[in-house]
Image (spheres, rainbow, N blue to C red):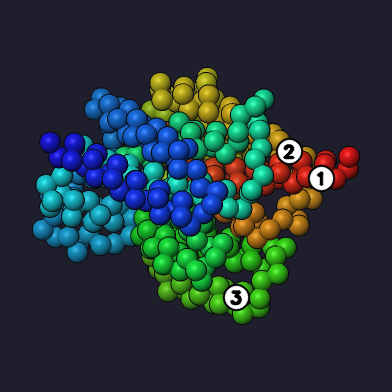
Amino acid sequence: MDVVLVILLLFLANKLFLTSLAKKHAFFDKSLIFKVFLYHLLFCFIYYLYASFNPSDSKHYYFVATLRKDDWMGLFETGTNFINFLAVPFIELGLSYESLMLVFSWFGYVGFVYAYLFFKENITTPIKIFGNVDFLTLLLFLPNMHFWSVSLGKGSVIFMGIMMFMYAIKKPKQRLHLLLIASFFVYMVRPHIMFFLLTSVCVGILFGKERISQTTKALVIIASVSFLIAASNSILSIVNLENSQDVFSDFEAFATVRATELSKAGSGLDINSYPLPLKLFTFWFRPLFIDAPSIVGLFSSVENLMYLLIFFKACNMGFLKYLKSSPFLVKASFIAFLSVSFAMTFITSNLGIIMRQKAMVMYFGFFVIFSYLVYRREQRLKAV
């Protein structure tokens, strides 16, 4: 019974949410985003069926949150326990596992809404791809992205936080509340991702083509550096380096052990010996059919092939020329895409985990390529 009530409440919340955003943004397409909402709900159901017959972290989160609900504040820490912390209030309200899946699916959906706003606000020119397919619409309906952001777990929350952050950073003064909320969620779920986001934004602001006042630059950089210093122990503790005397050597040792452990799994890969380009290729574009670990992997392979074809469009010298003079959000997205991917290749050697983890970074790459395709079309029109 609680499932029906939660669904009704989500439909109501979605209506109010979309109406509010439509008032703020003239370009906002309520019809399109409502379709994204229904599509995301469909994948919540698909994931629920998948989790019913396969191991899923969502079950463990619900079990632990139920077990430790009397120690709620004891769960307030970065990483896995933060998801348990978020789950406890809903469990106290009497929500079942299925209802909590719907709630966290909503978090993932909010991520897609802010992804739409992030793209649409910064790239006003539509681009067709693969014949006559609208690029942005395609990005909003990528199955793998929805599948890994609909469950009770880190994926839905981190995706919401990252996309909200990228939308808010365009106008930090006007969207300060969103920026703080997004930063909180990203930091609490994955502190190291917050580190990469802040670093990327700082570099983007310093070297972007926009004329940003020195005061704004200084404030953003000071705030970012202050946060990073204050949160350094939390960030390093992710890889057990909070007491390290030699961070680089100890990280390399940790990454080797971690990757070796993951490679022993059924869908494991021994990528420790791979050269860096092949590691990145594996993270971005595998599995690719022949190495798909499951039915889900086969579906993911189709999508990965699509990613590969999209990224091929940026494999030329014109892209590097554009990147050099690109806006700060493009530079920030490019740096975030590379830095997070680089870090993840050292600690991820399992195709199942790769399929999940890359969902939080691929939109950075898509944003950069989308921007480049618009730039390339404009240059061609000027040449006519």
Q: Secondary structure at mark 1?
A: helix
Q: Is residue 106 above or below residue 311?
A: below
Q: Using the image, tell me which numbered label, if any, was put on residue 284.
A: none
Q: Nearer the viewer, residue 16 or 108?
A: 16
Estimate the spatial distance between the alpha carbons at disc 2 and disc 3, rounded to whole Å. 34 Å
Q: In the drawing, what numbered circle is on residue 216?
A: 3
Crowding near the residue tagged with mark 1, few <14, some 14–19, many ≥20 C-alpha atoms within 10 Å:
few
**Residue contact between numbered discs 2 and 3, judged by CB atoms under 8 Å:** no
Which residue in the protein does label 2 denote?
A: 315
Residue 171 shown left or right of residue 63 in the figure: right
| The N terminus - image quarter | top left
Q: Establish if 278 lies above or below 107.
A: above
Nearer the camera: disc 1 or disc 2: 1
Q: Is residue 381 left or right of residue 226?
A: right
Q: Amino acid at mark 3?
A: Thr
Pointer 1 and pointer 2: residues touching (CB < 8 Å)? no
What's under tag 2, amino acid-wise? Cys
At mark 2, the secondary structure is: loop
Q: Position of residue 140 (x, y in %)?
A: 50, 38
Q: What residue sits 66% from the left and 71% below the top?
A: 212
| Dot in front, 2 or 3 | 3
Q: Which image quarter: residue 5?
A: top left
Mark 1 vs mark 3, CA separation in Å: 31 Å
Give the mark nearer the N terminus: 1 vs 2. Answer: 2
**Residue placed under numbered mark 1 in the picture:** 379
Answer with left or right where residue 192 lies relative to residue 136. left
Q: Position of residue 7 (x, y in %)?
A: 24, 39
| Tag 1: amino acid | Gln
Q: How far apart, in angstroms, are the residues tagged by discs 1 and 2? A: 17 Å
Judge the density around disc 3: few (<14), some (14-19), many (≥20) Cα neighbours within 10 Å. Answer: few
Q: Quadrant of the C terminus?
A: top right
